[in-house]
Image (cartoon, rainbow, N blue to C red):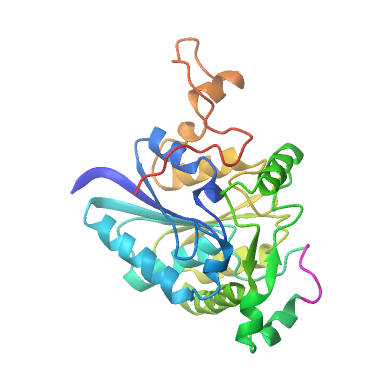
C-alpha cells in the first residue's frame, strides 16, 4: 500500500480535467496524488456522447476506484458538476469508507437563474431517441463564469476550438444526467462517507436547492456556500477558496491551495521561495499534466 493519500477527480459533462482548474496541482503541492479520469465519450468529439449511457460513466469510475483502492490506504473522491453526481453514485455503490467525498456544484436540480422556461420540454424529446441524439445543447455565455477576464479567456478558447471542453453536447446525454439526478436523490440518504458540499449562491445552472438537499439528506455532510462565482467554481473568482476548503476537508494543509509564486504576487510569500509559475492562473485550462 502507498502511505500517501490518493484523490480521484471526476470532471463534468462535455468537460475535461480543466473543469477542476488547478485542483490537481494544489493536491500535489500538499503531498497527495491526484488522479484524473476521462469519462466515456469525452476527450474526442461531441458526437461520441450521443450513444453513451450513464451506466458507462459509473462503471468507468468504479473500475478506476478499484484500481486505486489497491494502492492507497486513504483515497478521497471529488467531482465537479455532473462529475459530482457520478462521484456520489460511485461512493454509494462501493460503500466508500477509505476516505471522504467532495461534491462541487452538484446539479441535483437543474433550476439555476439562466435556465430557460422551455427546458422541461426536453423530457418529451427524450421519447424520440433519434431526435434527442441529433439535437445540440450549445455552450454559451456566461459559460458558468462570473469573472469577466476568465469568461473572455473561455470564450476565446471556444472560438479557437481548443480541446478543453465540448462546444455542445447531444440532448440525449443530458437525458443521462437526468437519470443520474434521480439516482442521486435515492442514493444520498444511504451514502454515509463524510461529504463536503460546495455550491455558489449565484450558480446559473443549479440553485442552492441542490446544496440544501444534499446537506439535509446525506448522513454526514457539511456545506460551503460561495458568494462570488457562477457554476464553474474551480475556475471562477472563488477558486482559491474552493481549493482551500477541499484540501482542509481531505486532511491536507490548505496553505497549498495557492502556489508559492502566486503567494508572492499576493504579498504572502517569502523572499526565499524558489521561483516558479503561478498555480492558479486566470486561465482555467492552465493546469499541467494529469496523473492516473
Q: Residue at x 63, y 51 (%)?
A: 232
Task: State left or right for residue 145 relative to residue 181.
Answer: right
Q: Residue at x 65, y 57 (%)?
A: 167
- Up/down of 106 relative to 251, above or below: below
Extreme-bottom residue of the structure? 127
- Up/down of 29 relative to 243, above or below: above
- Up/down of 144 relative to 290, above or below: below
| Quarter-of-image position of residue 138 | bottom right
Q: Who is closer to the viewer here, 99 or 54?
A: 54
- Up/down of 19 relative to 268, above or below: below
| Quarter-of-image position of residue 125 | bottom right
Could you tell me if residue 167 is visible in this image?
Answer: yes
Extreme-left residue of the structure? 1
Task: State left or right for residue 284 relative to residue 85.
Answer: right
Magenta-colored stretch includes residue 77: no
- Residue 128 at x, y = what percent? 64, 88
Extreme-right residue of the structure? 117
> What span is colored magenta in the figure?
114-118
Q: Who is closer to the viewer here, 198 or 15?
A: 15
Amino acid at each position: 500500500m502507498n502511505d500517501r493519500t490518493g484523490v480521484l477527480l471526476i470532471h463534468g459533462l462535455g468537460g475535461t480535467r480543466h473543469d477542476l482548474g488547478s485542483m490537481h496541482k494544489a493536491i500535489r503541492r500538499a503531498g497527495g496524488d491526484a488522479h484524473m479520469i476521462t469519462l466515456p465519450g469525452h476527450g474526442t468529439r461531441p458526437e461520441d456522447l450521443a450513444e453513451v449511457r450513464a451506466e458507462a460513466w459509473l462503471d468507468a469510475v468504479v473500475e478506476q476506484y478499484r484500481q486505486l483502492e489497491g494502492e492507497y490506504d486513504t483515497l478521497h473522491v471529488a467531482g465537479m458538476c455532473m462529475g459530482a453526481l457520478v462521484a456520489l453514485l460511485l461512493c454509494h455503490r462501493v460503500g466508500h469508507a477509505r476516505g471522504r467525498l467532495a461534491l462541487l456544484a452538484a446539479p441535483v436540480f437543474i433550476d439555476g437563474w439562466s435556465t430557460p422556461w422551455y427546458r422541461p420540454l426536453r423530457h418529451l424529446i427524450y421519447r424520440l431517441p433519434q431526435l434527442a441524439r441529433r439535437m445540440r445543447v450549445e455552450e454559451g455565455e456566461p459559460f458558468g463564469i462570473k469573472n469577466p477576464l476568465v469568461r473572455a479567456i473561455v470564450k476565446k478558447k471556444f472560438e479557437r476550438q481548443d480541446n478543453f471542453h465540448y462546444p455542445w453536447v447531444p440532448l440525449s446525454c443530458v437525458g443521462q444526467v437526468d437519470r443520474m439526478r434521480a439516482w442521486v436523490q435515492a442514493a444520498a440518504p444511504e451514502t454515509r462517507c463524510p461529504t463536503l458540499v460546495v455550491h455558489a449562491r449565484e450558480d446559473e445552472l443549479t440553485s442552492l436547492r441542490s446544496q440544501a438537499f444534499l446537506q439535509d439528506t446525506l448522513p454526514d455532510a457539511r456545506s460551503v456556500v460561495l458568494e462570488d462565482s457562477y457554476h464553474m467554481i474551480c475556475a471562477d473568482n472563488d477558486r482559491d477558496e474552493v481549493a482551500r476548503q477541499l484540501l482542509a476537508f481531505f486532511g491536507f494543509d490548505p496553505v497549498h491551495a495557492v502556489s508559492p509564486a502566486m503567494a508572492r504576487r499576493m504579498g504572502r510569500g517569502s523572499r526565499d521561495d524558489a521561483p516558479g509559475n503561478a498555480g492558479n492562473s486566470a486561465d482555467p485550462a492552465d493546469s499541467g499534466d494529469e496523473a492516473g
